[in-house]
Amino acid sequence: MTLNRNHLLALSAVFTTLAPLGLTAAPTLANQDTSSGRLAQNQILAAAQRSEPIATLFSYPQEERTATTLYVNQLPVLTFLDSDDLAPDTTPAIAQQVSQELNSLVTQADFDATKFTASWEGEGQYALQYDNEPLVTLDDAVFLADRTGNTTQDALIAVNRFRRILGGAEPIAEIANAPKAQNDAGVGLKVQRSMQGSASWYGPGFHGRRTASGEPFNQYAMTAAHKTLPFGTRVRVTNLRNNRSVVVRINDRGPFTPGRIIDLSRGSAEQIGLVSSGVANVRIDVLN
């Protein structure tokens, strides 16, 4: 049947009558925001509506003290050590406070993951902030769950995990007011030898599986696979396209694709802008 002008006018009248009753056309991909940030935020809000905390705590013994790790959407972000004056198995108050604040933030209508930032506080301390308000300070008792040994890098990883996990926000590349010496990956370590070649990264599908060294693979840790370097070797990987560096620890074997010399974890690849390109020309400095 061919629709003429009279048919179209009749259909228009029907939709005009139904609209006040709340009957509208079903949403389509054309009128939905399908960006990664919106999808991540929708997932967080859905969990909040089901009364599921997005931030949770897990405590365990560590060197005669109690450590508590903060998980955000089941991914480890920060670890808190109890003070000597706390009774055993006591969760530090600061860990509970941060967890409660994160669970509260994600339910707010104006929540925006891009508001997570980091600031250098002096004497090796970094503050993680939301909307320029302090959230937690990283120090000897509060640190990245899988810390790298570089405090600036740890703070950068921590804030970017909040940004990515809680809203799919783009990572920040550096902490603006961090001292240059502390912002230098591998500062204080000597270079034994260097090499150049192609680097790739791996993560999804391998997370949690056992590496060649025997430890579970954590795609967010600063680790990498190399064909011959001893396990535990620390190397600085520099992306020659943007000159960004990251220090990683060798804990796996690979890559097995011809022409590639190192395979980075997703977390370390993010630090040097390698994830989107997949492969990049890098310089590797073997450190001691």
Image (cartoon, rainbow, N blue to C red):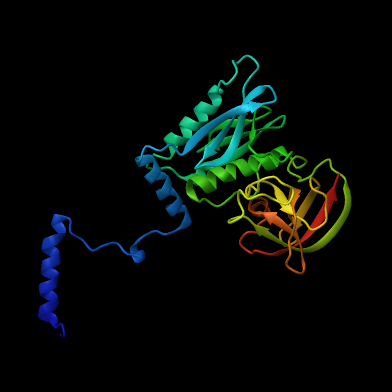
Q: Residue at left 84%, top 60%?
A: 195
Q: Residue at left 58%, top 56%?
A: 204
Left or right: 139, with 262 as reference point: left
Q: Quadrant of the N terminus?
A: bottom left
Task: Give the answer, above or below, for where 193 lies relative to 76.
Answer: below
Task: Give the answer, above or below, for where 75 lies relative to 17.
Answer: above
Residue 138 sits in quarter: top right
Judging depth in this view, the residue of 279 and 108 nearest the camera is 279
In the image, residue 112 lies at what x, y percent?
A: 46, 45
How many numbered discs? 0
In the image, residue 84 lies at what x, y percent?
A: 65, 16
Judging depth in this view, the residue of 108 and 212 nearest the camera is 212
In the image, residue 86 lies at what x, y percent?
A: 60, 16
In the image, residue 223 lies at what x, y percent?
A: 71, 49
Judging depth in this view, the residue of 275 and 127 nearest the camera is 275
Judging depth in this view, the residue of 194 and 251 nearest the camera is 251
Left or right: 258, with 53 as reference point: right
The extreme right residue here reads: 192
Q: Residue at left 64%, top 53%?
A: 266
Residue 196 sits in quarter: bottom right
Task: Give the answer, above or below, for where 225 lies relative to 106.
Answer: below
Q: Residue at left 46%, top 30%?
A: 100
Q: In which quarter of the image is the C terminus?
A: top right
Residue 39 sits in quarter: bottom left
Left or right: 44, with 130 as reference point: left
